[in-house]
Amino acid sequence: MMLADVIAVIIWLGISTYAVFGGADFGAGIWDLLSGGPDKGRRPRALIEKAIGPVWEANHVWLIFVLVYLWTAFPEPFVSIATTLWIPLTLAGLGIIFRGSGFAFRKWADTVARQRRYGALFAGASALTPLFLGAVAGGVASGRVPLGNATGDPMASWINPTSILGGTLAVLACAYLAAVLLTREAMLDGDYLLSEYFRIRGLAAGGAAGAVALIGIAVLAADAPSLYDGLTSLRGLLLVAGSVVGGTLSLLLLLRRRYVAARPAAALATVAILWGWGAGQYPWLLEDVAKIDDFAASSPVLWSLIVASGAAAVLVVPSLIWLYRLTQIRSLGDGEVRADSTEARFRKTQPNE
Amino acid sequence: MAVSLGFHIILAALGIGFPLITLIAHWRGLRTGDTHYLELAKRWSKTMAVLFAVGAVSGTTLSFEMGMLWPGLMGPYGDVIGLPFTLEGVSFFLEAIFIGIYLYGWKRLSARAHFFSLFPIVAAGIAGSFFILSVNSWMNSPAGFEIVDGVVTDINPWAAMFNPATGVQYLHMLLAAYMVSGFLVAGVYAWGWLKGRRDRHHRLGFIIAFSVAAIASPLQIVVGDMAARRLIEAQPAKFAAMELITEGGSNVPLTVGGLIVDDELVGAIEIPGLASLLGTRSFEGELPGLDGIPPDEMPPVNIVHISFQVMVALGTGLLILSGWFGVRWWRKRTLPESKWFWRAASVAGIGATIAMEAGWITTEVGRQPWVVWGLVRTEDAVTAANGVIWSLLAIILIYLSLAIASVITLRRISAGFREGAEVATPYGPPSDESKTSRET
């Protein structure tokens, strides 16, 4: 295995983590969008707010990671992707701006009308951003990105069968991951009814994702034959099978209300299909256009990326685990004030606070 | 791109400076047991959260734009300057993680862990700005590679990161971030002071934030001087444009104000020999002039000169204001009473922000026509895709609305503090939803 392949694997790890954590985050926004009017949607929205409030920013740094690694390790393919697919990328970028700021502003809006306006921004952009990101993936996977400065078709590169498949699958996967996450979050708060609410939605989204993936096989066979060949090789088939197993398992667990175990299974389904794509495309970085080894940066650059990955593994991963753990033991956010918390110091001296 | 950066730079500065100010308040609160300090830290953390959110998303979009708009830069040189971007990713990650913990950790996290979660945020700001500035200084002072037959080879990403310009440029920006944050936050309390809100809360809020900025100001003059003098050798065109030196040589006068119209200097006050004295510490010192710059390598001289002078003038004003505060505090341990001090202090943040933007325009426009100094011309770096100009226009409008919404939200937060309002549940009447569901 070459050094460039190691970097490609690291990039793929980043994409996988982004798909799971960022995906659940986008998905939470999708459920926010679908939870109805102010009265009906109040409880699910409060749960969504609580579940992603402390973690959403961290969840999206993975995307920055992927982009930076891509341009450092594979500058020319990166530039080709960015300039050919600039329309969906701009839209995804705007989507990221809108959902983040909408979420941050909604918290502070003082009237229901304003909250709804910011909420719609957050929720609508949450649904559209994965659609565009999936379309970008479809454009790359179906070999529609030629090398060079904006040499590809600016429209057909992202409006094509594979891109539509990629976008739809991304949106459904996000919704599914979020529903699985939120069932457990609801139970942590002892809200059985709300967990049922997300359980039903999770089953629907998961079923839909599975169905679209099945149809997708035919789409890829017709529209992206090289990727299809890769996917149906032994390596590809194993990963696809992994995704099928993970997806089915997570649906069964959801059905039986085993919400904690359903999380890794749903993540497996998502990650395995991404690795199936990666393995199906390997050794191509841009399908049928550019191979990983031919367009990698020189080895001192790649080594510096390995060093940076080491730093990330030592510093970021434990911090991230701590953050997620704190959310799961409900040490963040509202609730009963703990005796040794900072807030308790206020109350000691200021009983009226 | 310039618009996004110009917008992001303010948020980035606040992202670097605000946590430090909050840390000081929080620390004082724990040390003294005075809840006024903790209350300040809590309010600041909420403001910081909104700013960080907007900064995070505008920063993410910037990384898209790098490739979309500047393929001529990122294609050949993306690998040379990738390392600091990656490390910035690491620090940004830490910032995002710990800001989540700090912001949500007031009630149910131990006070110790809560306080310590501030440190990574401050450290990540200091480290992250280093990495980003190392990229910008690389564009001014490209290093860490060779060009053989037009191909970039022999890349050493570490040498690129630690290029000769990194040190001063980084310090200059870090101090600017502390000044902008300090003066902006202090300005809010100075405004309240003028309106008669002179309680302990306002007093402490002002002192903490203003002190940070007041300490940074004199240091900034020293670093700024180093940064400017470095350019005499490194980027003579930029230097000549900044100082508007029409003829190079020794005993060069300092040009205050003035414009170049039809190759003639008009409307300037010239102070004999001062530019040489400032630049080289001697009247006899040689300085580069615009006469030595080939026409096709000439930056837009007037913009560079005006923005440079604006920065210097504002910086000097802020130094005087800091001195006023410092002397008074040193001699009497009290705050100045003059209304003029408070008027100036309440707009100092805006002044510092304009100074930072002017400084940024100076360094960026002063580098033109190059995007990478001496190597890549801006026109060659830009995307070939049609219609990108429309996306730029859209981005300008969106940033504008984002800025307006941020200001409205921040005003609402501060109004909420005054009324003691709690956070509302999304789409509902303000109710403590999470608490009730916990109990049932």
Image: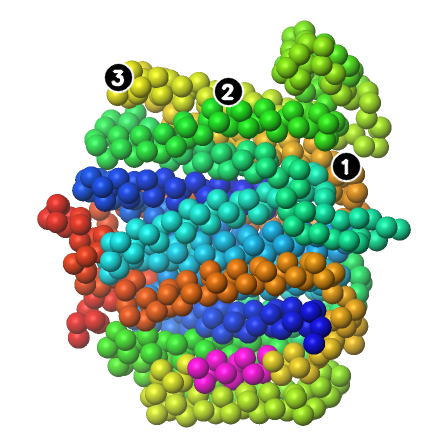
Residue type at tag 1: Pro
Label 1 environment density (alpha carbons within 10 Å; few <14, some 14–19, many ≥20): some
Inspect the magenta stretch and tell me whether residue A226 lies in it: no
Q: How did the renderer colour the structure?
A: rainbow
Q: Which residues are magenta?
A: A264-274
Instruction: Kindly identify the residue that appears in the image at 16 percent across and 58 percent down.
Output: A339
Question: Is label 3 in a helix, a strand or a loop?
Answer: helix
Name the residue tied to disc 2: B316
**Where does the image place residue B375, in percent across and percent down from the top left?**
79, 42
Asked if labels 1 and 3 touch by Cβ distance under 8 angstroms, the answer is: no
Asked if labels 1 and 2 touch by Cβ distance under 8 angstroms, the answer is: no
Name the residue tied to disc 1: B369
Name the residue tied to disc 3: B332
Instruction: Kindly identify the residue that appears in the image at 46 percent across and 66 percent down.
Output: A317
Pick whichever, B48 or B158, lies toward us.
Answer: B158
**Where does the image place residue A56, in percent across and percent down from the top left?**
43, 63
Which comes before the other along the chain, label 2 or label 1? 2
* SS majority, magenta: helix
**Horizontal side, residue B158 vs residue B32: left or right:** right
Write down the chain letter for disc 2. Answer: B
**Horizontal side, residue B8 vs residue A179: left or right:** right
Pick whichever, A306 or A288, lies toward us.
Answer: A306
**Where does the image place residue B336, in percent across and percent down from the top left?**
30, 18
Residue type at tag 2: Thr
Instruction: Kindly identify the residue that appears in the image at 71 percent across and 19 percent down.
Output: B244
Does residue A311 show up?
A: yes
On screen, A277 above or below B78?
A: below
Which comes before the other along the chain, label 3 or label 2? 2
Cα–Cα span, label 2 and label 1:
30 Å
Residue type at tag 3: Lys
Label 3 environment density (alpha carbons within 10 Å; few <14, some 14–19, many ≥20): few
